[in-house]
Image (cartoon, grey):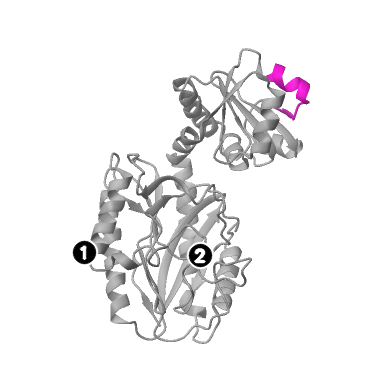
Amino acid sequence: MLTYREAMQRLTAMQAQLQTKGVDGALFIFPIDVYYFSGTRQNSTLWIPAVGEPILMVRKSLSRARVESVLTDIRPFPSSKEFSSLIGEQVQKIGFTFDVAPVQQLNYYTKILPGREFVDISAANREVRSVKSEFELEQLRVSATSLCSVFKQVPQFLKEGMRELDLAAEFEHRLRVAGNEGYIRMRAFNQELFMGLALSAGAASYGFFDGAVTGRGLSNASPQGASTQIIGRNEPIFLDYTGVFNGYITDMTRIFVIGTLDPELQRAFDVSLKIQAHLQKALKPGAICEELFKQAVEIADKAGLGAHFMGMPGEQARFVGHGVGLELDEFPVLAQGFKMPLQAGQTIAIEPKFVFLDKGVIGIENTFVVSGGGGEKITAIDDQITFL
């Protein structure tokens, strides 16, 4: 549960951003943003003034919001006529998260707050949320430990001849029993994911999902994840799953093989470990995200595997790591064009992967915390391929 002290630290950081940008206050309507600052995910709008106490305005459930939130001023959502006086006539410049707010919602608030200027504070909000407090790091460590506990169980139930879907169902069942909340929040438009991916060598790796690996899925309407493909011998079995505990997401991938592995795939796996080790060492405050991505690409290219790195040719993802927290796609991103320097306390899933058409997917993924000594690996189980 969010503490009052933790909430005040988050609000203070956001208010500092607003003051720096000359913004009088910010309206947050996206549920996970409201939760981050207030401690409740109820259907609410949160007003954070640049100076002063925030106001949580709740549509439903007001009673639950009052139980869950640590904020002092929690009230029913006001009428349109009351809203302007509640915010204050002196407020002229209002921050809004344009990255996730529907145009319809922006139009609604500009209508009930006429004459005010709405400005985008999406980047500032994501920067504030990217640096995790000790409270958040503890939530992430709990999430990672629980996720790892299920990965350790895979040799108990992975069998030749089962479908990808059977493997996914067994893994997801155990993950849910462990307390996984299941709902993977993503900020980017047109992105969705159901818990994770369980794929065999025959699985198609192309698709809409912004990542190295997608999977065939079960239909054109759900074109990602496990399919009815049969799992065979001597092929990489790719498990990429998230743990979601108390809202906090960790992300990891492990490879399993029933039998032996193609030498080309084994070599690619060894290169993925090399890239991970290089990036882990470099995950220090001040390191530039784009440079780390370029270094990963360079290692893949020097190994002669650049055409397979992070996806199929022509459909490769242009990143090698992504921030995790309450959402799967938080800041920072180790990606081309992302020139932000790392900060201590940021949490990043590093995922160097290689895709070979008709042979399968190979690679590794772990969640790390940025620190002065490099990345602290919190998905702390063995990285090596498990042979059965």
Give the vertical position of 243 relative to 55 (above or below): below
The residue positioned farthest toward the top in the image shown: 90
Q: Nearer the viewer, residue 200 or 303?
A: 303
Mark 2, secondary structure of its residue: loop
**Tag 1: amino acid:** Lys
Q: Residue at horizontal 50%, vertical 55%?
A: 143
Mark 1, secondary structure of its residue: helix
Name the residue that disc number 2 marks. Answer: 207
- Where residue 309 sits: x, y (%)? 34, 64
Give the residues in magenta.
Answer: 74-86
Q: Residue at horizontal 47%, vertical 57%?
A: 210
Image quadrant where residue 386 sits: bottom left
- Where residue 107 sits: x, y (%)? 67, 32
* 235 relative to 291 in the view: left or right: right
**Tag 2: amino acid:** Gly
Image quadrant where residue 382 sits: bottom left
Q: Quadrant of the C terminus?
A: bottom left
Name the residue that disc number 1 marks. Answer: 302
Contact, CB < 8 Å: mark 1 with mark 2?
no
Q: Give the crowd class for mark 1: few <14, some 14-19, many >=20 residues within 10 Å.
A: few
Image quadrant where residue 385 sits: bottom left
Q: Residue at horizontal 70%, vertical 31%?
A: 108
Q: Nearer the viewer, residue 114 or 346?
A: 114
Query: Is 85 one of the magenta-colored residues?
Result: yes
* 61 relative to 322 in the view: left or right: right
